[in-house]
């Protein structure tokens, strides 16, 4: 038998890319590839890129440049670029970096095996179409190998909202939901392989409206279907848009035991003037009222969010409104970014905020978020939480996992296995994790 070929995938960006990378590795598994953790011994290198951050494309070009030596030593090495930078740059990538053999956009991964075969014949392969067929259905079925207790499952892709700062509608295309039966089959398959927690993914996951046996289902209806799967203990979903938070989803947070008390609900800004310019179609007030309703359904829910500071024309007063909103919500987690221009998006053309000013605002916002994050985490001390154990901790005998609220929890000298879901009493809170003892 010939040696398996080795595939090195480097994944950038969001969880949807992590999921896509797994599926690409499985698809190329059918071509005789096994994954390797090192680019040096790879027969194929795939960069699964993200276009959200500043100078994303430039960073990909400089990463590609580093493979020059490897390719010179090993002329059969194939180099591919996948993900949102591949979609945005297309052919330009091969023009600027001739060592690239393959460029594949996020909607065309199911065509990877054919594309790989083409590169083996010495040709270049490019596919950045938005094809009609469901790439996930076309991809090779997930193999039955045992896997860790947590998994991602993409249920929805793309976005029709066109926030003025964002490239997603251009790189991931229009909003599409996968049919219910395919998601349920994939979820059952994951559970058979040892998965106990599934995070449903989508750019706007709560806009989900996939075809079910009797018409389209909402995300809440899909969650209730997943709830019936024996052995699946926890359900999460991300990322949600405030405008798609339906009544049934809010209610499910109060009534579905498997749905975890954690909600990532980005608001981006606390200023209505800026929200309008961002084309967010919600106000700070409507967002706050929404959180009130969610907390009425599930009082202990941990809220998480995203913020952009220094959006074009953001004044100090607008920024203060963001700080006020953060004070009011008290996030358990929040991610804040300095606005960066994305060519082709409407905001790129508008008057930009002074960079030093934006840096200063980012620091002030992050200080406030860190304070709240820490106080929410500290409030867990003395409480009993459920922990799903995922991996050994850094110290000998230690095991680590996540609480229902997504806090990292370590337990010393505990008699637990990976995949166990156990009650833990929290005894201490450190910078980024909690320590507990089995209850
Ligand atoms: N769909 C989600 C929503 O509407 O909240 C967010 C998806 S986006 C991939 C993830 C986050 O990246 C956004 O919530 C936003 O805070 C940030 N982001 C997107 N474009 C950005 C830009 N041009 N500059 C800075 N941050 C940006
Ligand atoms: Fe981007 Fe989210 Fe706005 Fe869609 S809703 S354009 S993904 S930030």
Image (tube, rainbow, N blue to C red):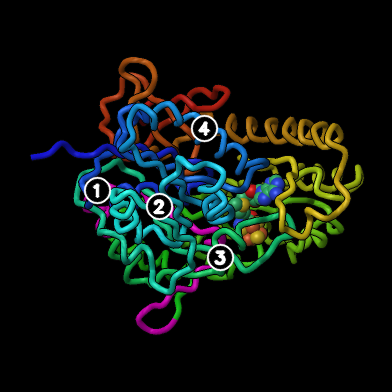
x and y percentages locating residue 387 in the rendered image: 39, 37
CA neighbours of label 3 inside 10 A, class few (<14), some (14 to 19), many (20+): some
Check if residue 300 falls in the magenta segment.
no
Check if residue 209 falls in the magenta segment.
yes
How far, Cα to Cα, is label 1 from label 4? 27 Å
Q: Nearer the viewer, residue 2 or 233?
A: 2
The magenta stretch is: 187-215
Give the labeled residue for mark 4.
65
| Callout 2: SS | loop
Tell me which numbered mark, 1 or 4, is placed earlier along the sequence. 1
Give the labeled residue for mark 3.
173
Tell me which numbered mark, 3 or 2, is placed earlier along the sequence. 2
Give the labeled residue for mark 2.
124
Q: Residue at x 84, y 58 (%)?
A: 272
**Disc 4 versus disc 3: nearer the observer:** 4
| Callout 4: SS | helix
CA neighbours of label 4 inside 10 A, class few (<14), some (14 to 19), many (20+): few
Tell me which numbered mark, 4 or 3, is placed earlier along the sequence. 4
Q: Tell me, for residue 29, which label it has, or none.
A: 1
Q: Are marks 2 and 4 in contact (CB under 8 Å)?
A: no
State the quadrant of the C terminus.
top left
């Amino acid at each position: 038998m010939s040696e398996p070929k080795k595939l090195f995938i480097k994944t950038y960006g969001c969880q949807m890319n992590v999921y896509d990378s797994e599926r690409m590795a499985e698809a190329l598994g059918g071509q005789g590839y096994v994954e390797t953790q090192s680019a040096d011994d790879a027969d194929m290198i795939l960069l699964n890129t993200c276009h959200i951050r500043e100078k994303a494309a430039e960073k990909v070009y400089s990463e590609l440049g580093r493979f020059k030596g490897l390719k010179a030593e090993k002329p059969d090495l194939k180099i591919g670029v996948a993900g949102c930078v591949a979609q945005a740059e297309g052919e330009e990538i091969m023009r600027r970096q001739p060592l690239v053999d393959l460029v594949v956009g996020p909607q065309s991964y199911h065509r990877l095996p054919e594309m790989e075969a083409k590169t083996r014949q010495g040709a270049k392969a490019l596919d950045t179409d938005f094809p009609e067929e469901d790439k996930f259905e076309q991809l090779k079925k997930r193999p039955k190998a045992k896997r860790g207790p947590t998994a991602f499952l993409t249920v929805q892709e793309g976005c029709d909202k066109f926030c003025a700062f964002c490239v997603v509608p251009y790189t991931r295309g229009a909003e599409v939901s996968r049919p219910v039966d395919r998601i349920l089959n994939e979820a059952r398959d994951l559970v058979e392989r040892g998965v106990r927690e599934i995070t449903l993914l989508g750019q706007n996951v709560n806009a989900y409206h996939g075809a079910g046996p009797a018409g389209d289902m909402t995300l809440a209806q899909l969650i209730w279907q997943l709830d019936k799967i024996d052995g699946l203990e926890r359900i999460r979903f991300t990322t949600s848009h405030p405008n798609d938070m339906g009544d049934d989803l809010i209610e499910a947070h109060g009534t579905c035991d498997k749905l975890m008390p954690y909600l990532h609900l980005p608001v981006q800004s606390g200023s209505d003037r800026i929200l309008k310019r961002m084309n967010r179609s919600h106000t700070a007030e409507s967002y706050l009222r929404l959180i009130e309703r969610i907390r009425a359904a599930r009082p202990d829910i941990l809220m998480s969010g995203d913020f952009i500071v220094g959006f074009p024309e953001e004044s100090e007063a607008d920024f203060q409104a963001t700080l006020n909103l953060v004070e009011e919500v008290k996030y358990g987690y929040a991610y804040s970014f300095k606005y960066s221009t994305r060519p082709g998006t409407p905001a790129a053309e508008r008057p930009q905020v002074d960079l030093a000013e934006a840096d200063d605002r980012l620091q002030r916002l992050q200080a406030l978020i860190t304070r709240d994050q820490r106080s929410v985490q500290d409030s867990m001390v003395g409480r009993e939480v459920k922990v799903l154990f995922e991996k050994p901790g850094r110290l000998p005998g230690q095991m680590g996992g996540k609480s229902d609220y997504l806090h990292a929890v370590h337990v010393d000298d505990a008699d637990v296995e990976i995949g166990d879901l156990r009650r833990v009493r929290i005894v201490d809170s450190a910078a980024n994790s909690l320590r507990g003892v089995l209850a």
